[in-house]
Amino acid sequence: MVALIITLIASLVPGLGSSAPTETKGTVIFTVVDRVGLPMRCAYTSTWPEIQTKELKFTAENGTVGFDAPAGTTVDVTFDCPAGTATASATAPETGVAQKKVTVDGFALSSKNEGSSAA
């Protein structure tokens, strides 16, 4: 419930918090969806040092967030969504992009590797 209120306020007040760009770039990309596959805008935190900040971060409107991690680096992310929370991790590939779909459902949480794509 708190996540829903925070998400709603941040989306209504321009400049509050920060949001990912519409086009998601990076070597590791997470896509957050609900149980029927619709994208979810969620707050997130990560252990990835490049984004550690006290400022609240959100996925893009299409539910994606990307990280430019060096090859072999594992990026761990925790998503706080209106439907619940989920934690996912993915390792940056030598070439291309690692994509991971994270399904957030108040009853069942899962994440699935979507594979990698060559750059």
Image (cartoon, helix red, strand yellow):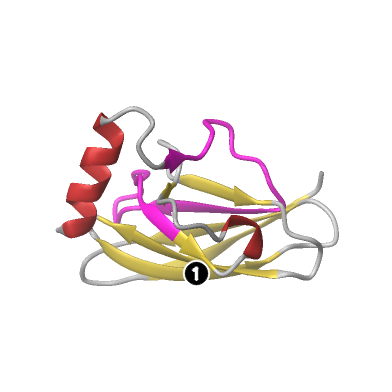
Instruction: Measuring from the top left, give residue 48's x and y in whole percent.
Output: 62, 65
Residue tagged 1 = 88
Q: Nearer the viewer, residue 1 or 84?
A: 1
- Name the residue type under label 1: Ala
Instruction: Measuring from the top left, give residue 111's x and y in whole percent.
Output: 46, 67
Q: Is residue 93 left or right of residue 42?
A: right
Looking at the figure, which quarter contains the N terminus?
A: bottom left
Q: State the extent of the magenta-drawn residues as a range.
A: 18-44
Q: Residues within 10 Å of mark 1 (few under 14, many from 20)?
A: many
**Residue appearing at x 59%, y 39% in the figure:** 24
**Which residue extends farthest front?**
54
User: Does 29 appear in magenta?
Assistant: yes
Instruction: Measuring from the top left, give residue 30's x and y in whole percent.
Output: 54, 54
**Which residue extends farthest top?**
14
Location of residue 18 with respect to 110 vertically, above or below: above
Q: Nearer the viewer, residue 109 or 42?
A: 42
**Residue appearing at x 52%, y 31% in the figure:** 22
**Residue appearing at x 39%, y 61% in the figure:** 79
Write down the quadrant of residue 21 in the picture: top right
Write down the quadrant of residue 52 in the picture: bottom right
Looking at the figure, which quarter contains the C terminus?
A: top right
